Image: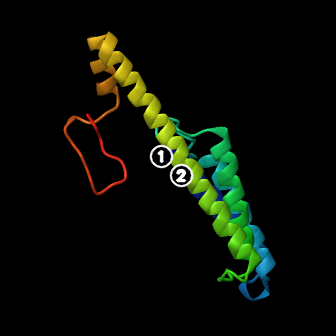
Amino acid sequence: MQCLSQFKNEIEVQVTKLFSTHKIGDMTPDMINSAICNILREAEKYLPSSKFNEAEKPYWCPELKCAQAQARHFRSVWLQLGRPRGSGHKFYVDYKSAKRMFRRLQTQCIDKYENSIFDKLNQASHTDYGLFWKLLRSQGGSSFEVCNFQSRRAKLF
């Protein structure tokens, strides 16, 4: 809460500094833009930022990170060109193919991770009954009889 009050005070300082040195009619868009950028830079100091949580996406790998960066790059280029559509526009085709490649790779990584979990469960079920139930409970969820046939994957246990 103290960080927010410090940030609020810093915003007030920046705004009063801007309006004390210039009249509203005399300000150019560049001046307003630089004042907003200064406020946003100050926000980075006071406001918390989130970090990547590995527990939410345990399947994530460096290849997936690279594919996502490439898809983001092609998307930004496509947006800068005014979002042209149709197979006649090279940047649109590049963006869609990069996006398709990322989604395909993401699906492969998810399947690979899920198969490794199922293999561990299968191996534990044959060797150690206690370990099997420990692994099964660690996957989350209270009911092991849920099966959703609408989705592509079904929870087997």
Q: Position of residue 118 (x, y in %)?
A: 39, 30
In the depicted structure, whether residue 67 falls above or below residue 89? above
Q: Position of residue 14 (x, y in %)?
A: 70, 63
Q: Is residue 80 left or right of residue 130?
A: right
- Whether residue 142 is visible here, answered yes or no, is yes
Q: What residue type is labelled 2?
A: Ser
Q: Given the current orientation, which residue lies at the most extreme front position?
A: 126
- Relative to the observer, which residue lies in front, 118 or 10? 118
At label 2, counting other C-alpha atoms closer than 10 Å, the crowd grade (few under 14, some 14-19, many 20 or more) is few
Q: In this view, does 115 lie to the left or right of 73?
A: left
Q: Do the residues labelled 2 and 1 touch (CB within 8 Å)?
A: yes
Q: Report the quarter where the C terminus lies.
A: top left
Which secondary structure lies at badge 1? Answer: loop
Q: Residue at x 79, y 86 (%)?
A: 26
Q: Position of residue 77 (x, y in %)?
A: 75, 70
Disc 2 and disc 1: Cα gap in Å?
7 Å
Q: Which residue is drawn at 22% across and 35% down?
A: 144
Which secondary structure lies at badge 2? Answer: helix
The structure's colour scheme is rainbow
Q: In the picture, residue 20 is in which quadrant?
A: bottom right
Q: How many marks do you count on the picture? A: 2
- Relative to the observer, which residue lies in front, 6 or 38? 38
Q: Residue at x 80, y 77 (%)?
A: 30
Residue corresponding to mark 1? 1
- Relative to the observer, which residue lies in front, 83 or 4? 83
In the depicted structure, whether residue 109 falls above or below residue 76? above
Q: Which amino acid does label 1 sit on?
A: Met
Q: Where is residue 100 in the image (x, y as percent from the top left)?
A: 60, 61
- Whether residue 13 is visible here, answered yes or no, is no
What label does residue 5 carry, if any? 2
